Every structure is written in C-alpha cells, then in structure tokens.
Image: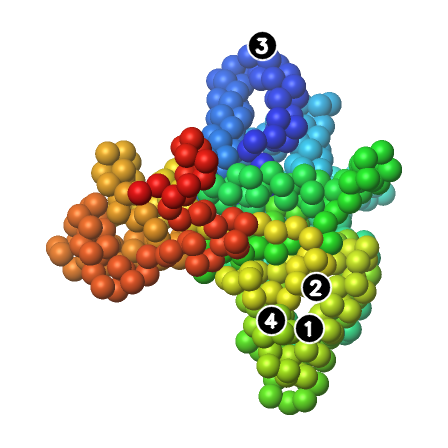
Amino acid sequence: MRIHSIANSPYFGYNKELNEKVNNKLRHAKGNKELANTLLALNTYCMETEDKLRKAEAENNQNLVDKYDALLIGVKNITANQINNRFPELHYREKELKGYKAEAAKRRALDPNYWLNQLILIMDDSAEIDQLLEDAIKTEKLAKKGKKHGSKDVDTAVLDAIKNFEPEKKDKSQQSEKVNKPQAKTDKKIKKPELPEGLEEFKPNKYSPRGFVSVGGMDDLKASFRDKVIEPVLNPELAKLDELEYGKRIPRGYIFYGPPGCGKTFFMEAVAQETGLPLLKMKVSKVGSKFVNQSSNNVQASFDYALKMADETGKPVFLMLDEMETLTSERKLTSGSSEDNKVVSTLLQCLDDVLGRNVIVIGSTNKIDMIDKAIQSRLNETAYIGLADDDTRYKVLYLKLNALYKGASLASNQEEMKKVVALTKGYSNRTIESLVLNAADIARRDGRRDITAEDFAVLCNTDKYLIQKVNENLYKTNNTRPAVGFNPQSGHGGKMIL
C-alpha cells in the first residue's frame, strides 16, 4: 500500500544540490572513466525515476507509482553505496538518509510498506552493515598489532555477524518505529486495552486512500478541512497565534451529510492518512443494544477511549460517528422513548467533555434533518458530500479502469470515456465502482476482450442500476435544496416559471 503523496512539495526528495555535486565529480573523474560514467548514469537514472514517481503520485496514477517504486529502491541503494565508497568525504548516504527520514517524519508516513519507508529501511540497513564491517576491521587491526598473522577468531566473528544480519526478518512495526522515532518503548507484555463495543480503529489496507491525492473532487471540502483542521493540528504554534490574533479555533466538530456511497467515510480515511493521526469509527449498528442503559454506556465508553488515546499520545484523535441519525434522532421524533433520549443526552454530555481535549468528532449521516438540533449545534460545521460532477466521475472511472489490464484502452480513449461519464450521471462512487466491475465481467465472458463504453450502456439500462440512480434533493437540507420551479436569476422576481 502507498500513502501520503509527497510529489507536490518542492521541499522533499533527494538532495538536488548534493547529487549535482556528485555528478560533477563523476563527469571530471580521473582514473577509470568507464566506471565513473556508469555511476553517473545510475545516479542520473535515480534522480529522474524519483521525479517520475513523485509526479505519478501527484497525478494519482497508481500503476506508474508501483512501476517506478520497483525501479527506484534497489538501484538507489546500490548507487548510494557506490557513491559513498567513491566519495566518502561527501557523506552522501548519510545526508540522503537524513533528508528522507525528515520527510517521512514530517509527512507522518507510518506505513512500513510505503516506498519512502522502504527506501529508508534498505539504505539504513546498508549503513548498519558498513558500520559493522568498519568496527570489525578496526578490531582485526587491533588484533594484528598483537599477532603477526591476524586473528582467525576475529575473521570468523566478522563472517558470522554478516551472515546473521537479516533485515528482512525485522518486524514491520519495528521498521515503522525506526523511521518515525516513537517517544518511548513500551513493555511488550502490556496489552493494548480492548476497544469498546461498537468502536473500531481505522487500519489502512491496499484499498484505502493514501491521503487527499486519492480523493477526486471535493476541492472546497479539502481546502476547508485543511485550513480549519489539518493545518492547526499539524502546526499547533501557528494555531495558537491564529487564535490570539484572529480568534480562529479548530471547529468543535463536523457533520458530513449526503447520499450513501458518495465518500463521507472515504474522505475521513484520507484525512487520517494525510495527517498520520488515528481515526476511530463508532459503528452505530453495534453501539445500539436491547438492554436498558447499554447503548448510552457504549457511547460513553467510546468517547472515554478516544480521550484516553489523545491524552496518552498527546496528539489529536478523530472520532467518526457513522449513520449518526440512528443514534441522535430528534427527541421529539422518538415517541417519548426514554432510552433514545438518554442516548442523545449522553452524546451531548460527551461532546461537551471532549471540547478542547484533542478529540475531533465527525458525524456522518444520510439524513441531516433527522439529527437532533442540540447535536447539530455542538458539531458546528456541516459539509454536504453529494454526487460526483463530470470531472470527478472521469477521474474515478479513469482510476478504476486504468487499474485493469483490459480496461486501460478505454481509460485512455477520451471520446469513449466521455460516453461513460454521461452514462454514469446520477450514480454514487460506490455504484460506479460496481458498474466497472460488472462491465469487466461482461467483457471477460464475451471472449475475454477489452472493456468498452457499450458494456456500461447495457448495464445502465438494466433495472438493477436504473433504481440505483440518486435523487439528491432527498438528502439536502432545506437550505441547500434547490427550489423546484423557481429561478431567482431569471428576472421574474422569484415567481413560478410556467
């Protein structure tokens, strides 16, 4: 899995000044010019490949990212070792490694399988081997001072040490810890407390977003969330200054609302990857209980867990309440159910308790009109996440199709893609993904041919998909729902147009 796109920042990547210095030395090298030219070609290759990899990340082209990833890491390590050996006075590998580590820490790239962390790991391992050999050579030199013919025991020890150095057997969690330098080691015997019933911690997998680079569209929401939440969280000193000078504060919480399958949860997973902060998701279907008081107890336990995590790490924690309308229905709509009212009251108290304590609450709902007004006032920012526009659907379809060998030709044909974009209007991202998979299935069964726009046309005319078209007006609030039959810009004074 790949996370945290870093291609769009000029402050990250290989040390360009250092590498140009190396290349100049190689161009004017004396002695074995053939070897020098080979090393020059290798280093230039590494620079160009890393540039291409970062550009592919910025363009969200996972196929190219994976290819350049595989082409870069091993060659970069070999090249760094050769440069280090040829120009030890430059401390090349040490400087490159320091830059990559600083980048990983600043970007909070936690996944040990991410290419940047893999690059750091393999270069670090080479540095450890060099140090091991250097120490062994020093030991052998000292031994030779006392023995004319050296020490067989020392030679054996050196070979055994190298033989037993197996970086691939390191635990991946230790690899991640080495890259990101955690605060303190904990006793392995101490078990992490179990999550309360109905609460789960987001653990990225290969299908998870890698940050905002994986989010098509939603530009306004990304900009708002970056300004109001992400930047203050990652730069607390600037956040304090903004609060002092302008009264700007991190919102008490957000409510994401809109049709199902349009990316509310996906967006928060991208935020978690973008910031490197934990994301806890309260699964409403498991929080509710038939037992008296148990539902409110589960809600309280979930908030307590989030608070404890924030206090122990000293970092903010995102707590997402999914399908929250089932937990926080307006009390006047609950037919006097004391248990439902108790859950709402507990949630209100919990929201007050976490205020200013590094827990950022995000509510997610398909029906914002059903959310209790007191809850809405606590979560003082709302964001509508609706159906993707044409440009966003194009990007989503391109990514899905381009990832399939038999879909790449359609993805690269702009005219045919426009047909597919038009056919998928009114569908959520989740349904679009289903359409791609079913179109692929049609092509597979029809002689294993390439996927075509006609496959989508067939599917979109079936009852299965016709009933999945979304009427967004059902999910918008009265404030965001467009007036039907009125055109305030028409010059008719807002009168009904017949």
Looking at the image, do the residues carrying marks 1 and 2 touch, with CB atoms under 8 Å apart?
A: yes
Q: Is residue 47 rendered to the left or right of residue 490?
A: right
In the picture of the structure, the residue carrying the numbered disc 3 is 28
User: Label 3 to label 1, Cα distance in Å?
Assistant: 74 Å
In the picture of the structure, the residue carrying the numbered disc 2 is 374
Looking at the image, do the residues carrying marks 3 and 1 touch, with CB atoms under 8 Å apart?
A: no
Residue found at x 63% / y 83%: 337
The spot of residue 272 in percent (x, y) is 62, 52
Looking at the image, do the residues carrying marks 2 and 4 touch, with CB atoms under 8 Å apart?
A: no
In the picture of the structure, the residue carrying the numbered disc 4 is 329
User: Label 3 to label 2, Cα distance in Å?
Assistant: 73 Å
Looking at the image, do the residues carrying marks 1 and 4 touch, with CB atoms under 8 Å apart?
A: yes
The answer to which of marks 1 and 2 sits earlier in the sequence is 1
Q: Nearer the viewer, mark 3 or mark 2?
A: 2
**Looking at the picture, does residue 391 appear above or below residue 429?**
above
Looking at the image, do the residues carrying marks 3 and 4 touch, with CB atoms under 8 Å apart?
A: no
Residue found at x 35% / y 53%: 427
